[in-house]
Image (cartoon, grey):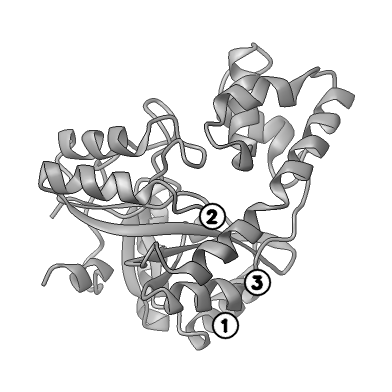
Amino acid sequence: MNVDLHCHSTISDGVLTPDQVAQRAYQNGVELWALTDHDEVGGLALAQATAEQLGIRFVPGVEISVTWLNKTVHIVGLGIDYTHLPLVDALRYVRSGRKQRAIKMAQALADLGVADALEGAIPFASNPELVSRTHFARFLVESGHCASIKEVFDRYLGEDGPAFVPMQWAKLENAVRWIHEAGGVAVIAHPGRYAFDPLQFDLLFSTFKELGGEGIEVVTGSHAPAQYEHYAQVAKRFGFEASCGSDFHGPGEGRMDLGKLPALPPGLTPIWQRWLS
C-alpha cells in the first residue's frame, strides 16, 4: 500500500497549498495520506475535503516542535481531531515565539553579510506566524548566496551554524499529551536527524515510550537508506509501531517526492493499520 504520513504545505513551510499537496499525493499513487504541518492545523480541513474528493484515505496530522536535552525534536501527531480547542490553543502558543526568532536570525545573517534576509524570507511564507529556517533558506538560494537548501543549513542555519537561533519549544510530555487528548497517536519524526549520542537516544526512546508514545518513523525522506534497518531495530526493541513519510516540502526539495517511499523493512507493525478498518 502506498502510504505517506509526513508532508507539508504552505500553511507551514511547504511550497504547495494543502489542496495542491493532496493532488500531488493522488497523482503519485498515494492511497493513505497525512498532512503534518509544523505546529499548525489550519490546512487540514481543505486537505481532508480534497482527499475525499479524490478518493484518498486521509489522516489528519501535525508536527509539533519539542525541545528535549536542549535540542529540537519533532513529534508527529496522527489521527488527531484538528478542531480540538486545547490542541489549537497549545499550537498557537508554540508558534508565538517564531517572530522574534526570525528577527534574530535575520540579524545574525546580516552580521554575516546577508542583508535584508527577513524581508527576503517573508514572501516565501504564506503564514506570517511561521517564518522559519526553510523560508530563509529559499531566499538565500534564490538570491544566489547558496546553491541549495542543504548548503544553507550546512553553512548558516543548521543547529551548529553561525545564524542558528535556538528556541524553547514545547516539552515532550506536553506534546504527547496534546496529541492524545485530541484523539491522536504520537510518533517520533525522522530520528536519524537528531544529534544525540547512543545513551541520549535510548533515553529519548524510553522516555517517549513511558509517556505513551506509540510510533517512530522508520522510512522517511530524511533518512539515508542505511538508516531504515537501524530504526526498524529500534522500533522492535522499544515496541513502537512503524511509520513512514517523505517529509515532502516541495518539488525538487529534499531527498524524496511525495508517495515515493520504499516499503518498510519486514517484521514491523505499520502504524497505519489503525486507519484501514
Location of residue 143 in the rendering, given as x and y in whole percent from the top left corner:
64, 12
| Callout in the foreground (2, 3) | 2
Is 160 drawn above or below residue 113 in the view shown?
Answer: below
Is 203 drawn above or below residue 231 in the view shown?
Answer: below
| Occupied quadrant, residue 199 | bottom right
Residue positioned 29% across, 37% down in the render: 19
Q: Nearer the viewer, residue 171 or 256?
A: 171
Q: Which type of secondary structure does the marked residue at label 2 adopt?
A: loop
| Callout in the foreground (1, 2) | 2
Q: Is residue 162 visible?
A: no
Residue positioned 10% across, 47% down in the render: 55
Q: Nearer the viewer, residue 269 or 95?
A: 95
- Asked if residue 129 lies left or right of residue 255, the reply is right
Residue positioned 44% across, 35% down in the render: 254
- Asked if residue 163 lies left or right of residue 247, the reply is right
Check disc 2: other Cα within 10 Å, few if <14, some if 14-19, many if 20+. Answer: many
Disc 2 residue type (three-letter): Asp
Location of residue 140 in the rendering, given as x and y in whole percent from the top left corner:
65, 20
Q: Label 2, on which residue?
A: 39
Q: Which type of secondary structure does the marked residue at label 1 adopt?
A: helix
Q: Label 3, on which residue?
A: 171
Is 262 drawn above or below residue 146 in the view shown?
Answer: below
Q: Which type of secondary structure does the marked residue at label 3 adopt?
A: loop
